Amino acid sequence: MKVSIFIFSLLFSIGCFSQKVYPYDKWKIQELSLAANFNSITFMDSSEKEILYYSNLVRINPKLFCKTYLQEYIDLNHLDISNSYISSLISTLNNSKSKNELIADTNLFEMAKSHAISMGEKGLVGHNGFENRSKKYLKGKFGAIGENCSYGDKYAMDIFMSLLIDEGVPSLGHRYNLLTSDFTSIGISIQTHKKYGINCVMDFAFDSSKIKIKSSLRFNFWK
């Protein structure tokens, strides 16, 4: 019941601001429920769960995400689709296949939270102490690991979209972490930041118990 209410409230709030008609009705209830797989999660707040929801939607049905959430975001914010980062994202999503959803993990959450608090209190950016943090919080539980950091964006949708579009990052590392099937688990923490007001840290990892078949593992982290 709580998952259904969450999904309805998100779709309703988006629809209230729509100037155009977007095919949100094409989303299957099974897809929406799978994306909102955090009903029993108590360690993340509503904004962190909202980011997880968008992260899973774009993985589960990238083409439909492109036609709905991304297209409406582009229109509402008057973004230029000729911008190379936006045009490449549209192309990537339209040519992507469905991937596994990400499962919220308490160890990854604590790792993300510690970094977001530390960077926020110091007014810094980046992945300071990433390897030491991964050893402390993950204790060898996971395979491939990655990290995204966002600064200054207040709302969940803006945080997520800025990382997905990844403008100004030639490697598109944030986008890769969000879309790759190399990861099965995630932790997201939003904290205050001394310089930028808000910072968000997303830590990703591969847990072999979450998926049966896994190809090559990678070690990636991007700011």
Image (cartoon, rainbow, N blue to C red):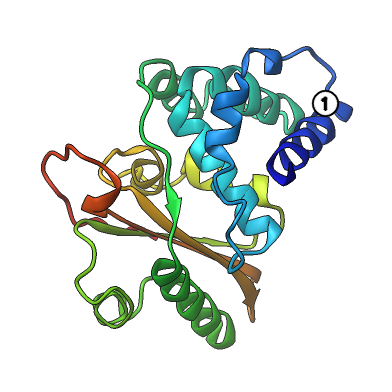
Is residue 127 in view? yes
**Residue at the spot 45% in from the left edge and 28% down from the top edge:** 60
Is residue 84 in view? no
> In the image shown, does 145 or 76 lie closer to the viewer?
145
Amino acid type for the residue under numbered disc 1: Gly
Horizontally, is 91 left or right of 205 in the view? Answer: right
Q: Position of residue 68 (x, y in %)?
A: 64, 21
The quadrant the C terminus occupies is: bottom left
Q: Is residue 208 above or below residue 78?
A: below
**Residue at the spot 43% in from the left edge and 62% down from the top edge:** 105
Crowding near pointer 1: few (<14 within 10 Å), some, many (20+)?
A: some
**Residue at the spot 36% in from the left edge and 35% down from the top edge:** 100
Q: Is residue 195 above or below residue 10?
A: below
Residue named by callout 1: 15
- Specify the quadrant of the image occupied by residue 3: top right
Q: Position of residue 157 (x, y in %)?
A: 66, 45
The quadrant the N terminus occupies is: top right
Q: Is disc 1 placed on a helix, strand or loop?
A: helix
Horizontally, is 61 left or right of 211 in the view? Answer: right
Q: Position of residue 9 (x, y in %)?
A: 81, 38
**Residue at the spot 23% in from the left edge and 62% down from the top edge:** 142
- Check the image and name the residue furthest to the bottom: 122
